[in-house]
Amino acid sequence: MERFRKSVVALIDDKIKGTTTITMDWRDPAVAARWANDFVGLANELLRGRAIDESTRNLEFLNQQLAQTNVVEIQQAIYRLIEGETKSLMLAHGRVEYAFTIVDPAVPPEVRVSPRRALMVISGLVIAGSAERSLRGLARPCAGARPSRRPESWRSSLRNRRLAARSWPASGGI
């Protein structure tokens, strides 16, 4: 659940505007839009249920306190509190969008947002090219164990040395 919340759902709370934006990032845009709308509906349902339970408990307590007191001023104060709780209970029962009002329902995007396949292909080609150059650069120092020249030129230089040795006069006297 934690992984889902971190990778799929994003909640952005704008205190200045007084709005909360819910973003769902999923493979299928239609599913993501449905989840976002259902998420707001579920949040409204849960908060409305909590408000109804809390107001009902408060009304029960206030009615108990009203039955126990005979002081008129306290009874009037309790009646005002009962009136406020009754209004809260009425709003919770009457409004479907209790806590969150949907300003703009989620719809699937018309233009694909991710993955950006062209960008992935281009970056893959760039990485592969730089990896090839790096590997070629690493392969050159290993060639230092061989003669520095190509074998053909090494053989020709050896042949030239032999010819040069034959052309020198022998060191012995005539």
Image (cartoon, rainbow, N blue to C red):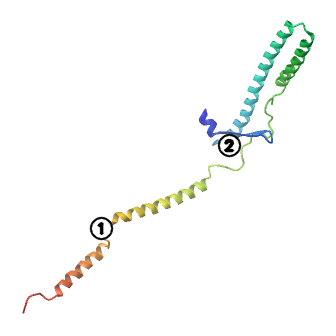
Residue 134 appears at what percent x and percent y?
Answer: 45, 61
Describe the element under mark 2 as helix, strand or loop: helix
Q: Residues within 10 Å of mark 2 (few under 14, many from 20)?
A: some
Q: Which mark is residue 146?
A: 1
Query: Where is 129 relative to 64, above or below?
Result: below
* Mark nearer the viewer, 2 or 1: 1
Q: Nearer the viewer, residue 153 or 109?
A: 153
Query: Where is 164 relative to 106, above or below?
Result: below
Q: Which residue is mark 2?
A: 29
Closer to the N terminus: mark 2 or mark 1?
Answer: 2
Residue 79 appears at what percent x and percent y?
Answer: 90, 15
Residue that extends furthest to the bottom in the rendered view of this protein: 174
Q: Residue at x 51, y 58 (%)?
A: 127
Residue 172 appears at what percent x and percent y?
Answer: 8, 88
- How many marks are shown on the rendered structure? 2
143 relative position to 86: left or right: left
How far apart in space, not on screen, are marks 2 and 1 (Cα)?
60 Å
Query: Where is 77 relative to 113, above or below?
Result: above
Query: Where is 66 relative to 102, above or below?
Result: above
Q: Residue at x 78, y 25 (%)?
A: 48
Amino acid carrying label 2: it is: Pro
Amino acid carrying label 1: it is: Arg
Q: Which mark is residue 42?
A: none
Describe the element under mark 1 as helix, strand or loop: loop
* The C terminus - image quarter: bottom left
* The N terminus - image quarter: top right
Q: Residue at x 27, y 75 (%)?
A: 154
